[in-house]
Amino acid sequence: MLEINNLKKSFDGLEVLKDISLQVRQGEVLGIIGPSGSGKSTLLRCATGLETPDSGEIHYEGTFGLVFQNFNLFPHYSVIKNITDAPIKVQKRDKEEVFAEARALLAKMGLSDKEKAYPYQLSGGQQQRISIARALAMNPDILFFDEPTSALDPELTGEILKVIRDLAAEHMTMVIVTHEMNFARNVADQIIFMDKGVIAQQGTPEEVFGSSNERMQEFLGKLG
Ligand code: ADP
Ligand code: MG
């Protein structure tokens, strides 16, 4: 579903991604962990075309959705317009059908009563659920998340992790950058530990979390 080969990216002479290669199969969840500044966001931004790599190849099938740390909802659009705008304007899909799907997504997120609300009237957890609904409304083949819970109060984190867990149970293909280690361990099929622009560890959650890699242990230790 997604294949990245020998990806490299520098900013002002600083090599932020050094020869990154990875694969994600259909229905698989890839968890990406690692310290701040290790290149996780740059990797997602390159994979989704928000950033141009210096070299390397990125192949994926179909369309993708992206969920950011800070929700990135359009503040002047109502909830329903945030969800329906791109499918109607970009994908040129039938308006009635898009609205029906958007309402089904709102129901799935437990936010049917918020259709006419504006982002500022919602909690962070609600805004993030709307932003997931907005990504899903494009019917993506793969969903990318960049630290979807790190802007949320701890008590709101669980509701977002549950939504992502439910999507995994439905075999949605996902790439998730997260600092939630228990979540990564439980939901991911494959884990990548990034450190200073390289993939320092890669494998099943058991392999990566069980590894005696010094940088990995140091990273886990700092998280407590
Ligand atoms: P992470 O998401 O793992 O915290 P990032 O991918 O955001 O790491 O950043 C990796 C490194 O690249 C950092 O040193 C950061 O300062 C640098 N960086 C990221 N984006 C830019 C940019 N647009 N311009 C210059 N430097 C950048
Ligand atoms: Mg980041």
Image (tube, rainbow, N blue to C red):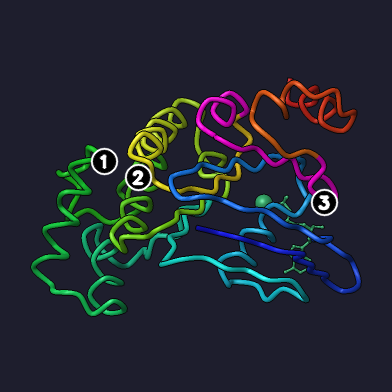
Which three-letter amino acid code belongs to the residue tagged 1? Answer: Met
Regarding mark 1 in the picture, which secondary structure is present there? loop
Q: Which residue is mark 1?
A: 109
Q: Is residue 190 magenta?
A: yes
Q: Which residue is mark 3?
A: 198
Describe residue 58's horizontal placement relative to residue 69 as left or right: right
| Viewer-closest of 22 and 158 | 22
Regarding mark 2 in the picture, which secondary structure is present there? helix
| Viewer-nearest of discs 3 and 1 | 3
Q: Which residues are magenta?
A: 181-200
In the displayed structure, 76 sits above or below 158; it is below
Mark 1 Cα shell of 10 Å, populated few (<14), some (14-19), many (≥20): some
Describe residue 77's horizontal placement relative to residue 36 as left or right: left
Task: Identify the residue at horizontal 39%, vertical 60% (top origin).
Answer: 73
Mark 3 Cα shell of 10 Å, populated few (<14), some (14-19), many (≥20): many
Residue 46 location (% of width, % of height) = 64, 67
